[in-house]
Image (cartoon, rainbow, N blue to C red):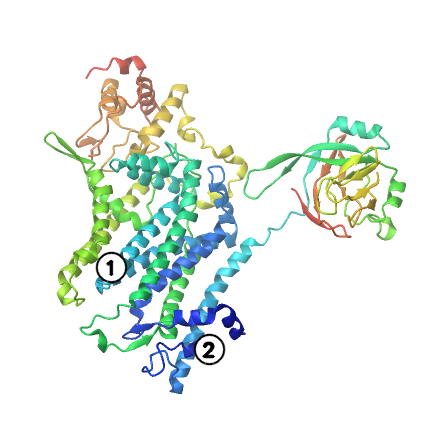
Amino acid sequence: MLNWIEKRTGFVSMTKDFLTEDVPGGASYWYVFGSATLFAMIVQIVTGIFLTFFYAPSAATAWESTRAMYLNPYTHFLLAVHYWGASAMIALVFLHLLQVLIFGAYKSPRELQWVVGVLLLLVTLVLGLTGYLLPWDMDAYFASQVSLNITGLAPVLGPVLQHIAQGGGSMGTATINRFFGLHVWLMPAVLVLLVGAHLAIFRHNGSAGPVVEDRRTLKPGRFWPDQFFMDGAFSLIVFVIICFLAFAFPPYLDEKADPTKFFVPYPAWYFLSLFGLLALVPPEIHLGPLTISLELIATIIVPTLFLVIVLLLPWLDRSRTRSFAARARLLWATTIIVAGIAGLSIYAQVTTMIKQAAAPPSPPESVVLSASAATLPPGGAPAAGSATTASQGSATSGAGAKVFAANCASCHGAQGLGLPGTFPPLANNPVVTGDANKVIGIVLGGLHGSISVNGQAYNGQMPAWKGTLSNKDVSDVITYIRGSLGNNHASAVTEAQVAGYKP
Amino acid sequence: MSDLNAGATHGTAGTPLTAHDAPADPLEVSRRTFMANATIAIGGIVGVVLAIPIIGSLLPPKSSSAGSWSPLSKQELDALQKATDKPVKLTFTLKYTDAYLPEQSAPEYCWGIKVDPAKFQAARPDIFNQPGGKANVDYPVVNMGFVVFSPICPHLGCYYNWSDAQNKFMCPCHGSQYTFDGTHVAGPAPRGLDPLPLREQNGAAEVTWIIYQSNTPQRIVVSYQA
């Protein structure tokens, strides 16, 4: 039978050629990370293909079809495996890259294999980023909002790139379509092509093997079955962990994306370090007449420089030696950078958790999933205004509530409770309910430096809203915050008062 | 698969044995066989664990065992009351669920005929072939002196039409023909026209939509659109 196929196709000898590969120094569990990454990729492709059987990319159906997947135990499990498989794949790419870095396996003649590998890491991160948006729940929406706005910060091309990625001036159905196309077609195609190149280059140069003075002393080991078995055993462990996490900690579906509601997005863990860097630096510093945007440096310049250095590593470290002793400085630098990335991630995790604790809680998943389809906003359009706050006051305070939800709630909180240490509460704040002229001044001109409210210190930066908000918007929102937040019952502010404001 | 263990030899004859050549040591042979089989088993385990939720997710959900009732218009029912020798097209709005979408509705119709119950029962043995003249569907077929037919041809699911000239229901797709009372008289269809449940509720008539298995001599309910 095999002979019959072999004569007509050559598949059997092709398979044998593929499996017949010398492993210098013998098979080792040190070499399993690349294969396990490939394994995770296959799991992602298989589960991803079947998830498209149930998912529909549009603002009217993305969240609804995802919710239907959560309600079916089989699709829920597939979704959970895809979710944890993504994390596993990114973790394995990192480990694989670190291993190649430590053992100096990127050195000549394997420079291009390293470059392709770094590109694979990038593609994997883009896959993680684009996949994050697809469920179109609150977290998906606001996390993607942040990353798209960071894209827009990039000099020259940033705004154009943001516009292209969003498919318009703001996020919506076009964004879902584009992210879907990127996540499901373009990026996987690029990924598979790059993996093909990565493997072809690998077979061309052979395995780098252990760090020794004279490679000729290495006894060759077998790829099949020795190394293949080790790869398989480790992949099975990875798979068991993915399935356990999928069962025990499936992903959480939040409410459908509603841009008018306040929400603290939670970045995926592999972006936490970038997020931490952003959270750590003030938005800008002033050096005499110069204003330097640290935000731009933290979100665009530092990561880009880092990427360029990593890509060019084989040319920056040109020495032929792979010995650990001779490469001590590089290994120390690697250790410090990895520790820095871990530290930034932990810092970002802690700040996010503090913010989430201060934010109004999301409804439990059981509530989100059991909501009948009839009560959802029709046509996928988000409900206008934050339902609880908008319905409380008069017509003016309804308009003010909208202005507040769109502009103020992201810092001061949907209920005006603020953020400890950074953004002061507006509810039960004597300044807000005190002199109306002072409040108008703060809204129009912004507020910088440390202030004290009810004995607590706050040091966040409040931008000037003059020019962004109309006088009517300003009077509406001040009327709203003075009259509707917490126990505030102060007088309304008119448009004329705002127009006639004098410090 | 085990002959893969032998491996393909590198280079030409005369070169030293490579690591891939068949080992002589029987212990080494059994070690390699174990590793090869274990690797294949791992692939099998992963495949099965993924295949179970994939296949499970693709299986159709359980369809509900009863449909909802859609009211027919008063005028069309009056027309049916008057017309005795011709069928009347009865339009209604069908409400149905479609996967995760909110409740859908679409204009739909069925064909109504006015019948003498005894004559109809005699004319349609494919419906009333059960002992005691019971219908082979679990609802009363004749109601208020009317029978309504699903507009879908039992052959392959096209919508048929009534021809005044031929005095027959004619299907445009493959030429199946039926008499006024739904008896199959020509063409490839395996059975006569399918009835739909009809009931009187507060003076109005209501129908339930049913999808029947196409192209079978038996009348098998596939789904009620609830």
Q: Which residue is mark 2?
A: B2
Which quadrant does the C terminus of chain A fall into?
A: top left
Instruction: Pinpoint residue B157: horizontal percent, then vertical percent.
Output: 70, 44
Residue with the most extreme bottom position: B25
Identify which residue is drawn at 49% across, 37% down.
A60
Q: Nearer the viewer, residue A264 or A178?
A: A178
Instruction: Pinpoint residue A407: horizontal percent, then vertical percent.
Output: 32, 29
Pinpoint the chain carrying mark 2: B
Instruction: Pinpoint residue A144: horizontal percent, then vertical percent.
Output: 35, 41
Q: Is residue B83 above or below residue A132?
A: above
Q: Secondary structure at mark 1?
A: helix
Residue with the most extreme left position: A288
Count residues near mark 2 (Cα–Cα under 10 Å), then give few for <14, some for 14-19, many for 20+: few
Quadrant location of residue A88? bottom left
Pinpoint the chain carrying mark 1: A
Quadrant location of residue B78? top right
Q: Which residue is mark 1?
A: A111
